[in-house]
Amino acid sequence: MIIDTTNQIDETFTVTKRQLKDVLTYSYFSLILLYSAVLILRHGLGYWSAWGLNNRFHMQGEATLPALYSGALIFLCAILLIRISRSSSTEARLKRGYLMLGCIFAFLALDEWIALHELVGLELERNYEFGGIFYYSWVIPYAGLLLLMVAVLASWYIQLPNKERIRYTLAGVVYIAGVMGLEMLSASFIDRSSRSMEYEMYAATLDIIIGFEETFEIVGMSLFALALFDVYTRYSGKLKIRISAG
């Protein structure tokens, strides 16, 4: 007698815009609450390690929950971009741009997870001395890559429908304001204040700047994900996730 104990799982879930928006909103506010709790423990109550929570929930650093979430959010955008580029309903003149952006965002997700930009910065700092807004020297080559991307994708961007162009622009401005603008502000603050301010005030101020920086990044990427979701569902219908195992 043969007994089949194999459990077959084959489920398909449909993701709605409301569900995606709720997940992004709740995730963002959860991260903010956790980070706020860490800051209260560190700067309000004097528990600098926040009982180990600092290493898990601080907005800066690798292998923290905010870094993992940011990387996952960027990767979601990469998947949506690539799926849009492969849709038969997507206009042919737009497919290449979506595919290129998808590959770029896949790289950015990897960068967020392994902090490749910081390794680039360390390599630069071995040979050159930087300060002020370029205290984090990685922004120099990445700004160059950003300008190159803008130049290459300019014609694609102009051909986008007005609604998509406006939404993508808004998301991009918010994200860049965080990832480069506020990053350069914090770099300038560190370079000017790390030796002149009282340490506790310096550390608290820096943590607040970092909080705003990561907020801009997450909000910008969330806006982009929602915009891409609308485009994907318009071209390809409902977004379905299939789980199959067994």
Image (spheres, rainbow, N blue to C red):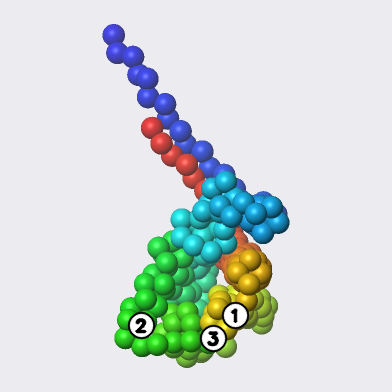
Q: Which residue is mark 1?
A: 196
Mark 3 highlights which residue? Answer: 133
Residue nearer the viewer, 128 or 43:
43
Residue at 56% over, 52% down = 49
Residue, x 69% and y 52% (percent of image)?
45
- Quarter occupied by the C terminus: top left
Q: Which residue is mark 2?
A: 124
Mark 3: give few (<14), some (14-19) or many (20+) Cα within 10 Å: many
Tell which residue pokes out farthest to the top in this image.
1
User: Could you say where residue 177 lies in the image, as x and y percent from the top left?
Assistant: 61, 79
Work out how far the residue at label 3 is from the one at label 2, CA to CA, in angstroms: 15 Å
Quarter of the image holding residue 165? bottom right
* Residue type marked 3: Ile
Q: Which of the marked residues, 3 or 1, is nearer the chain's N terminus? A: 3
Image side of residue 246 versus residue 177, left or right: left
How packed mark 1 is, by other alpha carbons closer than 10 Å (few <14, some 14-19, many 20 or more), is few
User: Which tag, 3 or 2, sits closer to the chain's start?
Assistant: 2
Amino acid at circle 2: Leu
Q: CA distance from mark 3 to mark 1?
A: 17 Å
Q: Position of residue 149 (x, y in %)?
A: 46, 84
Asked if one can make out residue 66 in the rendered structure from this viewpoint, the answer is yes
Residue at position x 55%, y 78% in the image: 195
